Image: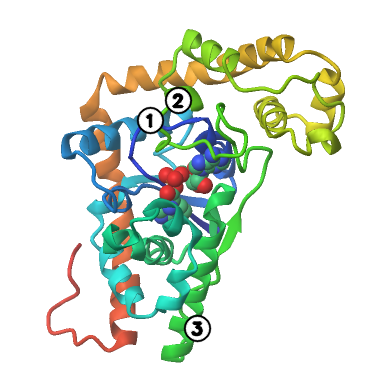
Amino acid sequence: MARIFSGVQPTGDLHLGNYLGAIRNWVRLQDDYECLFCIVDLHAITVWQDPKELTANTRSVAAALLAAGVDAKRHILFNQSQVPGHAELAWIFNCVARLGWLNRMTQFKEKAGKNRENASVGLYAYPNLMAADILLYKATHVPVGDDQKQHLELARDIAQKFNNDFGVDFFPMIEPLIFGAGTRVMSLRDGKAKMSKSEPSEMSRINFTDDADAIARKIQKAKTDPHPLPAAPAEFKDRPEAANLMGIYAALADADIGAVCQRFGGKQFSAFKKELAELAIAKLTPIRDEMVRLMADPAHVDGVLAAGTKRARAIAEPILAEVHDIVGLLRVCAPRKC
Ligand code: TYM
């Protein structure tokens, strides 16, 4: 069975973009792949995190993933920092990846902003850690949202260069799995900006922790334009908010965007928003309720992560030992138990 690896940062509440772009697809792929799902706490600290909040967010993201349908009995759910091989392979990849490759990463430019000199080295080398996450398990398939595409291309380049540099056929080629109607969910306040945890306005996103009232309020206040809804996707040009809201509807309803346009075309936003809110509440509040239930028992959540960690280490250790041999790192003790 082909192996999947994917990750999410514990930098705050998960939101609708995470769900439609990635997590829902993770859940759907569980029957056809062997899956490792990772809460990437080492990625999170590439920008400053309050330590207490980081710990709490790691647990609540684990609860959110379980509530959304990640099956931690059949598959592996764990937090990145508990498997030291991630950081170790990332160092080796720091020595494989080229500066020029990292200089092209658009997400670094966006996140570092104007004050590039003040960004952490970790933020710059972030994609190398991401490549290590995947290749530490020789995973071949990576379900993500559209914004991770460039990072996955870099991971492929790293795998290829490692194989070439050492004359081996060791790391597999990575296939991004970017599919479904929600690969790029935009902010509710600005149809041109990605829905994101780092956007200060809570009104810009629907969180997993939002109750029915909050979801309804955010959708009701979502930015629109003054025209009736488009009757076909071709009319989305220059109408980013209509495209986004109708795209969210299509993704939540598992419907074709053309069919959604046909159904709501010519209607006012107000009527559509009511239906969108009802749909979002029906799909998301059961996840929220389960998440609240799981959060009441943090020891259970920690136990799930501990079990996942053990299983992840067992896969990673022999692969990392082979990497050491390939690179020529002298082994003077028995292979370390991570
Ligand atoms: P992160 O935590 O930003 O997002 C987790 C997943 O959610 C997707 N996503 C979105 N999809 C659609 N619309 C949006 N507005 C939206 N916002 C986020 C992301 O594409 C992602 O799939 N670097 C990664 C985490 C990571 C990783 C990995 C992923 C670390 N190592 C290895 C795959 C494989 C990140 O920051 O995701």
Horizontally, residue 84 falls left or right of residue 268, namely left
Quadrant containing the C terminus in the rendered view: bottom left
Image colouring: rainbow
Residue at the image position 52 percent from the left and 30 percent from the top: 16
Residue at the image position 25 percent from the left and 22 percent from the top: 297
Which label's residue is closer to the chain start, 2 or 1?
1
Residue 257, compared with residue 167, is above or below; it is above
Horizontally, residue 161 falls left or right of residue 190, namely left
For label 3, the SS is: loop
Q: Residue 296: x and y, percent?
A: 26, 18
Q: Which amino acid, by three-letter code, is at mark 3? A: Asp
- The residue carrying mark 1 is 13
Residue at the image position 40 percent from the left and 77 percent from the top: 99
Q: Which mark is residue 93?
A: none
Q: Residue 61: x and y, percent?
A: 35, 34
- The residue carrying mark 3 is 169
State how far apart marks 1 and 3 are (Cα).
Answer: 40 Å
Residue at the image position 26 percent from the left and 50 percent from the top: 45
For label 2, the SS is: loop
Q: Residue 207 carries which label?
A: 2
Which label's residue is closer to the chain start, 2 or 3?
3
Q: Residue 12: x and y, percent?
A: 34, 34
Q: Which amino acid, by three-letter code, is at mark 2? A: Asn
Judge whether residue 14 can be spotted in this image.
yes
Q: For the residue carrying disc 3, how many other residues have a C-alpha within 10 Å: few (<14), some (14-19), or many (20+)? A: few
State how far apart marks 2 and 1 are (Cα).
Answer: 6 Å
Residue 227, compared with residue 247, is above or below; it is above
Quadrant containing the N terminus in the rendered view: bottom right
For label 1, the SS is: loop
